[in-house]
Amino acid sequence: MTTSNNISIFGIHSDAERYTWAAYCLFVLLSSLIGDTLILYASTHNVFKLNKFIVKVIQHIAVCDLVYAVTAVFPAATSLIANSWVLGDALCYGRVYTSYYIYTVGMALIAVLTTTKLLLLKYPVRCAQWTKRLGHRTCSLIYIIPLTIPAAFLIVDKNDISFDYTAYNCQHKYKADVWRKIMPIIGVITLFLPNIVILVTTIPTLKYLATAWESARRVRGSFPLQGTLTVALTATIYCIATLPVFVFYITKENPEPSLSRIQFRRIANFMSMINIMSNFYIYSLTIKSFRDFLTSRISSILSACLRIMTTSDEGDQERRGADRSITQINETSV
């Protein structure tokens, strides 16, 4: 049976607060399921008018977001509504092994995205020849290194997993002494390096955007925002969403956590979920071809609904007309 920490200390005691977080998680879940599915559909139908390599990276990020939404966001929403873990032991362990791994992969893929865009800006002719196949191979390699996380769980202590009322999800507790030795190594490889790459490659991209914007404003011209702004916003939102988590883990933790620290950890955990749903809104805002695709699909759905309603109204009118005719015939017969 899945164990848990003390609900009286770590749990949410206000129903209004708990249901607010549950509604937030459900919004993130629906945004990811709908948005990332549309991203995958659009990318496979050549809607994105971007570099082919970047399109392939976008596809892999969307897949990671979908997996994380199902394995982490959905269990959190369910636990918040039920105020406990109700999905069983198997899903508790599956949540930890899957979501810890896939979130790290998604982080590394964002680093690939920002690095690729910076190289495209610096070497546009050479990098323009990069293909979708090369992008797929590069992304496939990214899935290998984060495998050290679930592998370490299995080797060190596969049963050190319990339900945490702070995040309202199953978490690994890292109680074994060996974690003090191997966690710094794993953390540097899977967490620190990708974040450093994202930061180092995003800053020059933002500088390029600022310079290009200033030049375009000076000559009253325009410059292509698509692609560059997309990557820059993706990286910026990621950094903002993960900053509280980073601050939490680098600050010293007391043996007896205070209520403020518990609340801060909860906020940091839920805030990191923004990464899962933000890409759909970023692409809708910055990529015109994707925005046109969404507009056309919405128009088609509205037109279909209107036709159905019109057909239904015409059918009702015909039935009412037929009923009146039958009534008139019966009255004449009488």
Image (cartoon, rainbow, N blue to C red):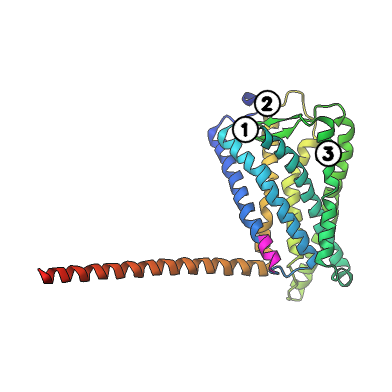
| Distance between the alpha carbons at the discs numbered 3 and 1 | 25 Å
User: Given the current orientation, which residue lies at the most extreme front position?
Assistant: 333
Find the magenta span and give its range. 39-45
In the rendered structure, find residue 27 and report the number of the disc placed on it: none
Q: Secondary structure at mark 2?
A: loop
Q: Nearer the viewer, mark 3 or mark 1?
A: 3
Q: Is residue 40 magenta?
A: yes
User: How many other residues sit within 10 Å of disc 2, few (<14), some (14-19) or many (≥20)?
Assistant: few
Q: Nearer the viewer, residue 60 or 12?
A: 60
Residue 24 sits in quarter: top right
Residue 79 at x, y percent in the picture: 60, 36
| Distance between the alpha carbons at the discs numbered 2 and 3 | 25 Å
- Marks 3 and 1 close (CB-CB < 8 Å): no
Write down the residue under mark 3.
151
Q: Which quarter of the image is occupied by the N terminus?
A: top right
Residue 184 sits in quarter: top right
**Is 196 placed above or below 53 here?**
above
Write down the residue under mark 2.
5
Q: Secondary structure at mark 3?
A: helix
Write down the residue under mark 1.
85
User: How many other residues sit within 10 Å of disc 3, few (<14), some (14-19) or many (≥20)?
Assistant: few
Question: Can the viewer see residue 199 in this picture?
Answer: no
User: Which label's residue is closer to the chain start, 3 or 1?
Assistant: 1
Residue 12 at x, y percent in the picture: 60, 31
- Callout 1 amino acid: Trp
User: Which label's residue is closer to the chain start, 2 or 3?
Assistant: 2
Query: What's the residue at 90%, 32% (across, down)?
Result: 181
| Distance between the alpha carbons at the discs numbered 1 and 2 | 12 Å
- Callout 2 amino acid: Asn
- Callout 3 amino acid: Ala
Residue 52 at x, y percent in the picture: 78, 67
Query: What's the residue at 82%, 56% (across, down)?
Result: 139
